[in-house]
Image (cartoon, rainbow, N blue to C red):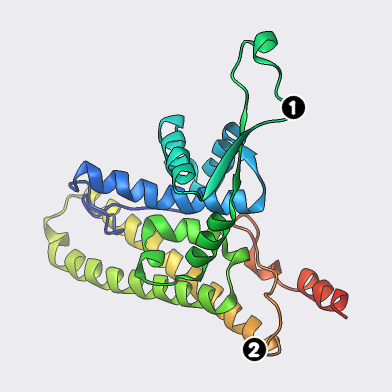
Amino acid sequence: MYQFDTSIPGNVSGIGQDEPEEVHVRGRTDVLEPAILGLLHEAPMHGYELRKRLNLVLGSFRALSYGSLYPCLKSLVARGWIAGTESADAPPHALSGKRARIVYQLTADGKEHFQQILASSGPSAWEDENFDVRFAFFAQTDAETRLRILEGRRSRLTERLETVRQSFARTRARMDEYTLELQRHGLEQVEREVRWLDDLIDNERGLRRARPSGAGHPAVTDIQIAVDGASGTPAQTTEKERG
């Protein structure tokens, strides 16, 4: 997904470059921790595999280094949310000359904490950095929470767009043609995201109307699959299996 920066013309994300470094570090940790917990909730993984999967979830524009991954893993282990064990198929140290691979998995406390993350739908879930990660795990999130997050995200972007449009109208006469085009490009991209959110919200509301009260979670797309084909067969199969 696209990310913008309001510290330069044309960008409307609301994340400024003049923030202190500790704010950015904390922001990266806030994004990385739920992403790690979410992936380990699916299956145990060793560090290299986890890094590859995280780069898919976080996007190519937020490439993840081992320098940021392993301190976060260490912190999660210290808090008891994940555990690391040597891989059973790792070659002996004496023969390989390499360190044994550590496989990480969620603990019971980690699963409980991840469920708390999935159930939260406050403003932090709508922001630029966190929204991408929350959306990546919508398949594990209940329908009511998904809808609240989508509506909150749309509301946040709509408010931001109005502010930027007003600023654009006041200052466009003083902009050169390239700055003007950059500003217009940023606005158009966020307008597309708002339309995309509108479609997702309509889809979620349609799923709620179609499903009887108390039914299980509908099948939801993952971030690389079109939303239009997300519901249907898996959810119907589940209902049949339940009898």
Q: Quadrant of residue 237?
A: bottom right
Q: Quadrant of residue 127?
A: bottom left
The picture places residue 186, in percent across and down from the top left corner, at: 33, 57
Element at badge 2? Answer: helix
The Cα atoms of the two marked residues, 2 and 1, are separated by 49 Å
Which amino acid type corresponds to the residue marked 2 in the rendered image?
Arg
Residue occupying the point 69% across, 67% down = 230
Residue 119 rendering spot, x and y as whole percentages? 50, 71
Of badges 2 and 1, the one in the foreground is 1
66 relative to 223, above or below: above
In the image, 45 versus 208, the foreground residue is 45
Residue type, label 1 = Asp
Q: Is residue 138 above or below residue 242?
A: above
Q: Is residue 223 above or below residue 149?
A: above
Q: Is residue 63 visible?
A: no
Q: Of helix, strand and loop, which one carries label 1?
A: loop
The residue identified by callout 2 is 209
- What mark, if any, has residue 167 been given in the picture? none
